Image: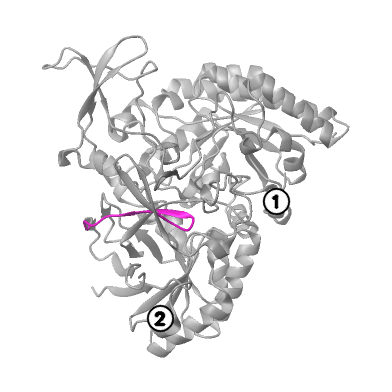
Amino acid sequence: MLAPSVGIVAPVSSLADAEAAIAAGADELYCGALFDDAVAIFGDGEVLSRRQGRPAHVRTPDELAAIAALGTSTGHRVALTLNGRYSSSEQPRILELAVTWEAMGGGTVMVADPALIVWLHERCPRLSVHLSLLAGVFNSASARLFASLGVTRIVLPRDLCIDEMAAITAAVPEVEYEALALHQKCRFVDGMCGFYHGVRIPENVPADFAYERVAGTELAVAWCDDPAYEGHGCELAWVAGEERALPPRCDDVGAPHCAACQIAALARAGVHHLKIAGRGFPTVLITRAVRFLRLAVGIWDRAKSEEGARRTVITAYSRAFGSSCDADRCYYRLNAEGDW
Amino acid sequence: MTVEHAVWADWRRVRASELPATARIYLGHETCEHLLPPVSTALELARAARDLGTRLTLACPFLTEPGIAAALRLTEALQRTVDHVEVAASDWGLLSRVRGSGATPVLGRLLTAQVTDPRLLRLLRPEDGFEREREVVHADGTRCVLRRRRPSAALAHHYQSVWCDRPDAAAFLAALGITRCELSCPQHGLALDAASPLRYSIHVPDALVAAMRRCPAGDHDRDAAVRCRSLSCTGDEVTWRCGGLELIRIDNALYHRSSAAPACHAPGAVDRVVDHALLRS
């Protein structure tokens, strides 16, 4: 066995998502919540959790309660994502949501706001607190600080290499560690990104918002915060002079960033929870991701050699996503020298 | 209230003899651990500042294990040379260690998590004449008009404020010995609580928008974990453009520079301005 017990954490935005992710083999789930009253005040951007759009969030308290109940009945941890850094305007709503989640039987929250951690331990003591990668734990001293605040799991930043993760987990072994393993590797350091993540309304997909009839136009009217939103900063086609300044983002549908070849290395580095990014992705993409990682974990479990396991996983990637694996899509390097 | 004038001194470009007589200098690097100054260079600048009666702030970015060790060595060396060293760090680990060393920890710009995207002006000041509506045709043939929703006061406050401005957050920071935070003044302005026990430094003229683990280099340095060749990072400015957006890349970070001074509703809370332009040329 080359990969000691490793769990898969899947993003969900609805009860249907949650049921499908569990059926596909997810060990844990995480979700955000964005209800109508919050949208009326804060819009559907990234204010209450660092993910934009209603499709990326559970929309009603009843559905959130149902997801909590599902997690409890099936023995799957569900983490409510409260991973913004909150001004005094939205803080009351966040605190209310945390209290509600605890009352619903939700066992875990994932946060990035350090002062919120302190509040949660005082007011919601039954909740386990996981630290989002947005908090930016790049070294063991940071991990130690958050462990002292009562955090029980740390999601490590996308920007670390595996050796760097190992140094942190070895120095602070009293918390669990989680890392992204599929989808959405960003060029910019997530927790330190000042780009605004709005909702882009493309023309080529059905939209998901309420229309109104308004005098003065025969067309249905939909309201949004920023009709001209071009996309996230990392998605834009920046040029420096005549040249492209950034490589294009990977296509998460056909060729996602992936750490499936690195499962054993991550486990040796103390990372035993693999996170799938993509709250708001269609259910079919989430279940595909879960199945692929579940398959990859099984390959590593049965493998007799690392080289053999890696080759088998690479083949599985091609079958799952329809494209060849490429070094550009590896989520992590082994070390700062750039070795695989 | 008196506003302290501080000057950013890029150690790669500024000689000790060129330091101006000002209240404070900042040295170090806000976004890249490989661009922290060698101890000898930092001490040379620190001695010059001390001789001018200028106070010192060491700026540090997010740090890996070797980086935090280097930052602590730098801090200790500076403390042996000058009094009252401040360390403005965007790293929770370093901040937690600095307090015990006797230096004064300050929350760095990257940890204040400001949203500084210049496009927020479209969101928050729709009366400024930005596009107000556009027609959209969906895949199913449905046509609709997208209109701009006026932002609520709460939404505007979210983008103009910072998390550390909350009373509970200020208390959390105070427990770590932190009573000052470093901020950008983004195009859409700042709104801070005058009653907050925190004090703020504003860095001008550039709002820090994003940081990368490594600078783009060569074929865009596709892998951010590959060790960078820091000798090639000279602090030169590279303009990035996309449509009507323009940002400045300096080393591994992106900044927005605007000629118009943004509104800063922070009566009494801002008591320091850090000028990055004075010694730039």
Q: Which residue range is magenta in the image?
A: B249-261
Q: Which residue is mark 2?
A: B55
Depth check, front residue: B258 or B160:
B258
Residue A281, x across and y down, in percent = 50, 24
The answer to whether residue B44 shows anywhere in this view is yes
- Residue A25 location, quadrant: top right
Mark 1 on the same chain as mark 2: no
Depth check, front residue: B163 or A328:
A328
* Residue extending farthest bottom: B51
**Mark seen at residue A335:** 1
Residue A174, x across and y down, in percent = 70, 50
| Badge 2: chain ID | B
Helix, strand or loop at mark 2:
strand
Residue B247, x across and y down, in percent = 36, 50
Residue at figure coordinates x 33%, y 81% from the top left: B22
Q: Is residue A138 left or right of residue A302?
A: left
* Residue extending farthest front: A242
| Badge 1: chain ID | A
Q: Badge 1: how crowded within 10 Å, few (<14), some, or many (20+)?
A: some
Residue B258: within the magenta? yes
Depth check, front residue: A152 or B137:
B137
Residue type, numbered disc 1: Asn
Vertical comparison of B191 with A42: above or below: below
